[in-house]
């Protein structure tokens, strides 16, 4: 399987939307879209999205007749793209919700999308992730990093320009790269846990890429800093948009040079090697819990497990009475 297809299996990836980048500066076309019955708006307030209430919540996307004064109220309107003859915009609503709170409350509640895990259909989740990430970027870049003047949204929300003509700073949406690595030694894999995680929860080792290092440098450094393990044979696995708040997770596998774990910083409170037998025994006993199945961490662990087991990991987990997939979000 090539990397494109492998990443497409990751939740929040493979967004089917056509971003239509050249249209971002076509004011006439954009105005037509804002007035079209085929346009839908994703309201976002405090990084939360509007969801219907009920057993299976669904996102509320507003059509033009449902918009009322929201277009005038929104602090930023971002053109996301088109899919199946529908145009999508994200609306970043102001913190003061007095102008719209009551009317939108009739349609649903603003909730953090991470609460619903993989309950949403994957294409819908990818669209919401895109909207969440770009509105978060606008919120954090209202002032120029060069001169401190206010910035304004341009290019349909895909750039912010400094309002100080003497500065002229241009700011583009950014994504923070973070690596996550499943390390093997023979048939065993290395998992660790942070002290704030729920009891029994273990995951692959992750960390942010620092300026001046390659992705592979970051894998080697993070593993050494967090576990004391030196790794070789670093291979890219796949990537996953992770809008909590603004990351892309870059999955890797690596091989340990030795198995001597030494927790070198305060990130992890425990790290240990798991054989498949130990892994299964602990899961069945309720002593081990894994990252949610919609995370790339789960995908990495799943590939390790499935490499040598005839029963896929998801089938094995489903066979354990009471096993529940966890939602865990790096923030
Ligand atoms: Zn400036």
Image: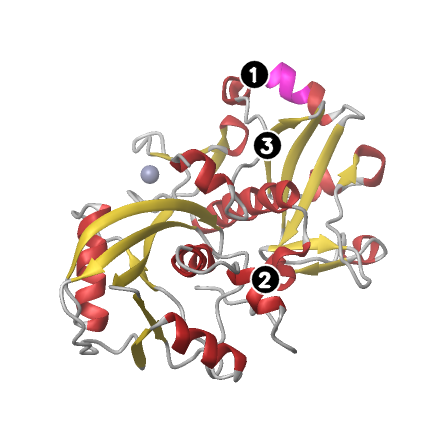
290 horizontally vs 162: left or right: right
User: To which residue does mark 2 refer?
Assistant: 315
Q: Earlier in the sequence, mark 3 or mark 1?
A: 3
Pointer 2 residue Cβ closer than 8 Å to ligand 1: no
Assess disc 1: are there few (<14), some (14-19) or many (≥20) residues with their C-alpha within 10 Å of its C-alpha.
few
Give the x, y percent position of residue 42.
68, 43
Give the x, y percent position of residue 147.
30, 43
In-front residue for pair 150/216: 216
User: To which residue does mark 3 refer?
Assistant: 16
Q: Earlier in the sequence, mark 3 or mark 2?
A: 3
Q: CA distance from mark 3 to mark 1?
A: 22 Å
Q: Earlier in the sequence, mark 2 or mark 1?
A: 1
17 horizontally vs 279: left or right: right
Ligand 1 - quadrant of the structure image:
top left
Q: CA distance from mark 2 to mark 1?
A: 50 Å
Q: Which residue is found at the position 48% from the left and 84% from the top?
A: 287
Between disc 3 and disc 1, the foreground one is 3
Considering the whole magenta stretch, tell me its main secondary structure. helix
Q: Which residues are magenta?
A: 27-31
| Residue 26: assigned label | 1
């Amino acid at each position: 399987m090539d990397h494109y297809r492998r990443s497409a299996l990751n939740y929040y990836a493979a967004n089917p939307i056509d971003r239509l980048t050249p249209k971002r500066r076509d004011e006439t076309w954009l105005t037509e879209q804002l007035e079209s019955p085929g346009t839908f708006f994703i309201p976002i307030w405090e990084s939360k999205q509007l969801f219907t209430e009920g057993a299976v919540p669904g996102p509320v996307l507003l059509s033009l007749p449902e918009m009322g004064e929201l277009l005038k109220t929104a602090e930023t309107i971002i053109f996301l793209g088109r899919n199946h003859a529908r145009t999508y915009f994200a609306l970043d609503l102001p913190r003061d919700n007095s102008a719209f709170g009551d009317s939108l409350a009739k349609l649903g509640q603003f909730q953090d999308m991470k609460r619903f895990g993989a309950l949403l259909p994957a294409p819908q989740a990818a669209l919401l992730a895109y909207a969440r990430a770009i509105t978060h970027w606008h919120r954090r870049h209202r002032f120029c990093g060069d001169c401190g003047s206010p910035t304004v949204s341009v290019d349909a929300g895909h750039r912010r320009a400094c309002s100080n003509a003497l500065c002229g700073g241009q700011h583009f949406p950014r994504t923070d790269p973070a690596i996550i690595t499943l390390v093997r030694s023979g048939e065993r894999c290395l998992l660790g846990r942070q002290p704030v995680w729920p009891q029994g929860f273990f995951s692959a080792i992750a960390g942010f890429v620092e300026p001046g290092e390659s992705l592979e440098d970051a894998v080697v450094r993070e593993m050494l800093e967090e576990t004391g393990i030196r790794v070789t044979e670093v291979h890219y696995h796949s990537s996953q948009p992770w809008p909590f708040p603004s990351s892309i997770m870059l999955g890797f596998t690596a091989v340990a040079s030795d198995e001597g774990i030494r927790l070198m910083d305060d990130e992890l409170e425990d790290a240990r090697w798991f054989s498949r037998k130990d892994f299964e025994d602990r899961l069945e006993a309720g002593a081990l819990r894994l990252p949610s199945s919609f995370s790339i961490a789960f995908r990495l662990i799943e590939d390790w497990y499935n490499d040598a087991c005839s029963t896929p990991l998801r089938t094995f987990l489903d066979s354990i009475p009471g096993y529940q997939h966890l939602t865990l979000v790096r923030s």
